[in-house]
Image (tube, rainbow, N blue to C red):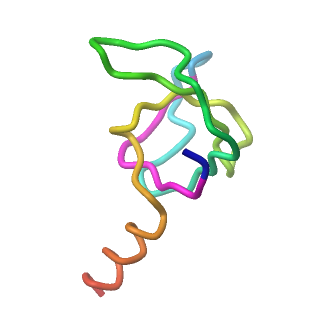
Amino acid sequence: MPGNYVLTEDMASPITGEVIAKKNEKIIVEDFKSPIGSISNINIYRVMHNKTKQEIYISNRDIKRWEEHLKNLKQCG
């Protein structure tokens, strides 16, 4: 679903294996995405990481809504 999200885990480059996207960094999903595949019945999506402008692969488990993240920060702070 399009929108602003935050990563719940560090993500590595699919090419180098180097961690390029860190937990709590923002990503934007600009359009409805179809999964590119699945692993153990978990859909996998290709999205763009804002900071590095590189593609990363995520599942729904790897992200949460930006608004939810901000709400959690306010409750902790």
Q: Quadrant of residue 26?
A: bottom right
Quadrant showing the C terminus = bottom left
What is the x, y in percent for residue 35?
52, 22
Looking at the image, which residue is at 34% across and 85% down? 74
Residue furthest out toward the right: 53
Above or below, comparing residue 45 to residue 4 in the picture: above
Looking at the image, which residue is at 48% across and 64% down? 66
Residue 75 on the magenta span: no
What is the x, y in percent for residue 36?
55, 16
Disc tally is 0
Residue 6 on the magenta span: yes
Looking at the image, which residue is at 30% across and 15% down? 41
Q: Which contiguous range is marked in magenta? A: 3-13
What is the x, y in percent for residue 60?
39, 37
In the foreground, 16 or 23? 23
Quadrant showing the N terminus = top right
In the foreground, 16 or 27? 27
In the foreground, 20 or 53? 53
What is the x, y in percent for residue 56?
58, 30
